Amino acid sequence: MTEAEIYEFDLNGYIIFRDLIPADLVRHMNERLDADQAGFPHSFQFLHLDPCFMELMANPRTLRIMRTMIGDWLRLDHTYGLQMNKETELRENLHGGLRADHGEHQYQWAYNKMWNGLIVVMYALEDVPPGAGGLIVVPGSHKAAINTYKPEVYSHLVVNPSFKAGDLLIFTEALVHGTRKWVAPGQRRALLYKYSPGYSTWGDPANLAKYEPMATTQLQRDLLRPPYVGKRTPLEFPEV
Ligand SMILES: O=C(O)CCC(=O)C(=O)O
């Protein structure tokens, strides 16, 4: 990450990177997901559906960013997809925040670098036009001094980031965030890959075991390792 990118992430608790997935791969992913899903569920699993999703887990550009945020021993924590259209029923909400979930949602600076807990990497497979709904965040709340208060979902403090298919939005779970109803024409579809430091986990690591036989590279296998510290080797980060 550049100094400007680190500054932006530190300031806001989230950051958008443009054009990470090429348009033809976005199309392929959408076709693969369309073929799998009946009934347009709000949330879905996808990692097992096609090798391209496992490859995205180990995308060199994303891992380079994760390395700055989490360090050399990072691991995949869990994945799921989200999709919404105007008909999707949901409870609009804000959740997360610094030290939430047993303290695992952490954001700290020490020794001149950031230390993160669970980080969300959200790839858009459909455009999110301004004001469409979907992900909402409270910029800067990952450093808030008060954790007994959350703003209203439609407060002026809340932002609904707009980004395009193929873009990547990254946020720390220490950021207060949540979901608004989708009000735009068309639909939202996003893939969420959540990464943790090698010593910690949010999800049940047993859930990752079923993906191990599908890993085709050592890097993919290393990312799927359960959390532990002793004798853990750092990831071999690919060239970008
Ligand atoms: O993107 C959304 O609608 C919400 C995502 C969320 O709550 C999370 O990743 O924890």
Image (tube, rainbow, N blue to C red):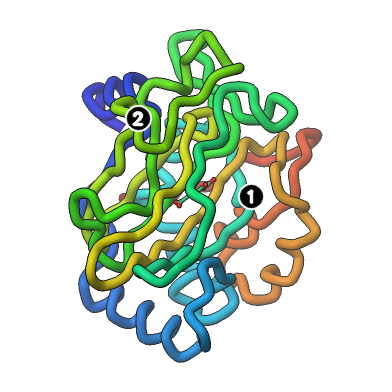
Q: Give above or below for 76 relative to 8.
A: below
Task: Determine which quarter of the picture holds residue 31.
Answer: bottom left
| In-image side of 210 versus 222 (left or right) | right
Residue at mark 1? 77
Could you say which quadrant of the image residue 161 lies in? top left
Q: Position of residue 46 (x, y in %)?
A: 54, 73
SS for tag 1?
strand
Residue drawn where x is 37% and y is 53% of the image: 134
Residue drawn where x is 48% and y is 56% of the image:
192
The residue to which callout 2 is attached is 155
Q: Secondary structure at mark 2?
A: loop
Task: Report the residue at 41% width, 67% height from top.
Answer: 84
How many numbered marks are there?
2
Residue 143 image point, x, y percent: 47, 15
Residue 110: percent from the left, percent from the top? 52, 10
Single out the mark in the foreground, 2 or 1: 2
Look at label 1 and name its amino acid.
Answer: Asp
Question: In the image, 107: left or right of 84?
Answer: right
In this rendering, the answer to whether 203 lies above or below 156 is below
Closest to the observer, 44 or 31: 44
Mark 2 or mark 1, earlier in chain: 1
Q: Does the residue tagged 1 have its C-beta within 8 Å of any atom of ligand 1?
A: no
| Other residues around mark 2 within 10 Å, as few (<14) / some (14–19) / many (≥20) | few
Quadrant containing the N terminus in the rendered view: top left
The answer to whether mark 2 and mark 1 are in CB contact below 8 A is no
Task: Measure the alpha-carbon separation of dots 2 and 1.
Answer: 31 Å
Task: Say left or right for 128 vs 155.
Answer: left
Q: Nearer the viewer, residue 118 or 65?
A: 118
